[in-house]
Image: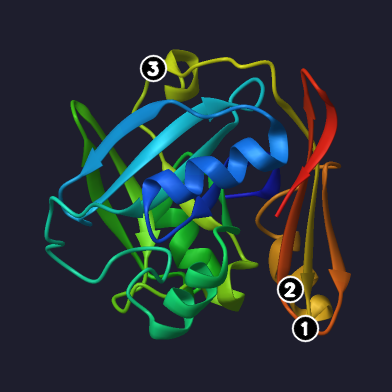
Amino acid sequence: MTALQAALDHLTVAATTIEEGVAHVLRALGVAPPQGGAHPLMGTHNHLMQLGDGVFLEVIAPDPAAAPQRTRWFGLDDPQMGARLRASPQLINWVVRVPDLACALAEVGKESGDAVRVTRGPLSWLISIPLDGSMPFDGAFPTLIEWPAGPHPSSRMADLGCRIERLVITHPQAGHLSAALAGVITDRRIAVSAGPALEIRATIATPLGVRELT
């Protein structure tokens, strides 16, 4: 894998309930992502919308009607994450697609986890998930995903007129993060900055003007 083969795929907003997550996006962007589907393996469900060509926004939360078959992804079973999300839904991770996930994981290291097959309805894909459901750099480092051949899933999602313009990841270990990202993705829209705490901030053009999502 080279950075030129990878691409920004989607942003993940998490919440304790899907309704709270959608309301968070509505307050920030002025639009409400419509329903997506459920992930039986993870015991989660989502709402989805396009953010441009081959990029989308996901709102995800535990599904009260389902029990996970393993530790949930995106740290959703971690008590500290639970406390963060009870305070407010938030943008917790970003996802990069790669042509061969197994090859990519061999290059980036075991901290990114294993290639796990996940389904949502008829769609099936591979995604990197550590056994404990955690995220490298607490979510500042991207989750990696490999989609099946064919049109990108975002082509079937609602287009509410939103387009991502910039993604800024702030982290106390910005230097280490930048070095880790250098071999993963090259995208002028993505920037890393140093700060006392993790923050992922997306600048998005919407029908109501340019807005920020955190």
**Residue 204 left/right relative to 152:** right
Q: Which mark is residue 173?
A: 1
Circle 3/circle 2 CB separation < 8 Å: no
Q: Which mark is residue 83?
A: none
Q: Which mark is residue 150?
A: 3
Circle 2/circle 1 CB separation < 8 Å: yes
Q: Classify 10 Å Cα crowding around label 1: few (below 14), some (14-19), many (20 and above).
A: some
Q: In 3D space, how far apart are the residues under numbered discs 3 and 2 (Cα atoms)?
A: 32 Å
The answer to whether residue 8 is visible is no
Mark in the foreground, 1 or 3: 1
The disc labelled 2 sits on which kind of residue? Leu
Residue 90 location (% of width, % of height): 59, 58
Residue 61 location (% of width, % of height): 36, 54
Which of the marked residues, 3 or 2, is nearer the chain's N terminus? 3
The disc labelled 3 sits on which kind of residue? Gly
Circle 1/circle 3 CB separation < 8 Å: no
Q: Classify 10 Å Cα crowding around label 3: few (below 14), some (14-19), many (20 and above).
A: few
Residue under label 2, please give it.
177
Tag 1's secondary structure? loop
